[in-house]
Amino acid sequence: GESVGLHLPTLSVQEGDNSIINCAYSNSASDYFIWYKQESGKGPQFIIDIRSNMDKRQGQRVTVLLNKTVKHLSLQIAATQPGDSAVYFCAEIPYGGTSYGKLTFGQGTILTVHP
Amino acid sequence: NAGVTQTPKFQVLKTGQSMTLQCAQDMNHEYMSWYRQDPGMGLRLIHYSVGAGITDQGEVPNGYNVSRSTTEDFPLRLLSAAPSQTSVYFCASSYEGAGNTIYFGEGSWLTVV
């Protein structure tokens, strides 16, 4: 309900630690999953995506893991920096391979990195 | 190029007033969409367009109208503003072949009193 939406999960880490942000999704038919970073007062920024036929994908300092059995997605950030502090959202794209700009977003997690 | 540009950045409306949020992109993208973001929540799709002259509803279309007369512009109209429409609105664009790269504007903060 509305009250759940006002209390985002939070994750606090020390600079240099590794961070793991989790997301549960509901649509088994989703073709792609994307992680976005949103800083205060700004629009979402693409981080990394993964197709449903993969279970792991790596980028620069980030790794996304997909577990379709339990409908779970995670974002791992290595050597977390203060500049990584933001709200992180997972998003789904329906099967078809292209989004046409249509995304279904998850609730979001607030990541705070302490120097 | 400027990317996705939204105006106004901030707006206060009285209940029942109408207004249009403007969105323009200079990247010649076919796909454009409007989302709203309520406090502590992810974005929800209002309307989207796959090309000039073509629009369709998203998850939360009620109370909003859109049109796409040109490739560049995708305005969002609130016909009779309600307090429940107090939110942050994001416009986005993308194109065939972009994969999952979707470009978001900076957002428009709307308060309906």
Image (spheres, rainbow, N blue to C red):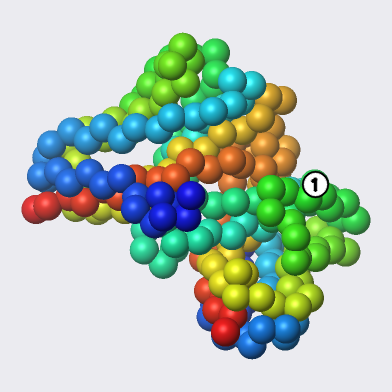
For the point 69% across and 73% down, the residue is B22
Q: In this view, does B36 lie above or below A101?
A: below
Q: Would residue A10 be found to the left or right of residue A69 on screen?
A: left
State the image coordinates of residue A15 (x, y, percent, origin top left): 12, 45
- What residue is shown with label 1? B50
| Chain under numbered label 1 | B
Q: Would residue A110 be found to the left or right of residue B40 on screen?
A: left
Q: Would residue A20 be found to the left or right of residue A105 on screen?
A: left
Q: In this view, does A43 lie above or below A57?
A: below
For the point 86% across and 55% down, the residue is B52
Look at the image and tell me whether residue B29 can be seen. Answer: no
State the image coordinates of residue B107 (x, y, percent, origin top left): 54, 67
Residue in front for this viewpoint, B78 or B49: B78
Image quarter where the N terminus of chain B lies is bottom right
Residue in front for this viewpoint, A41 or A10: A10
State the image coordinates of residue B26 (x, y, percent, origin top left): 69, 62
Under circle 1, the secondary element is: strand
State the image coordinates of residue A67 (x, y, percent, origin top left): 42, 16
Look at the image and tell me whether residue B25 can be seen. Answer: yes
Amino acid type at circle 1 is Val
* Mark 1 residue crowding within 10 angstroms, few (<14) / some (14–19) / many (20+): many
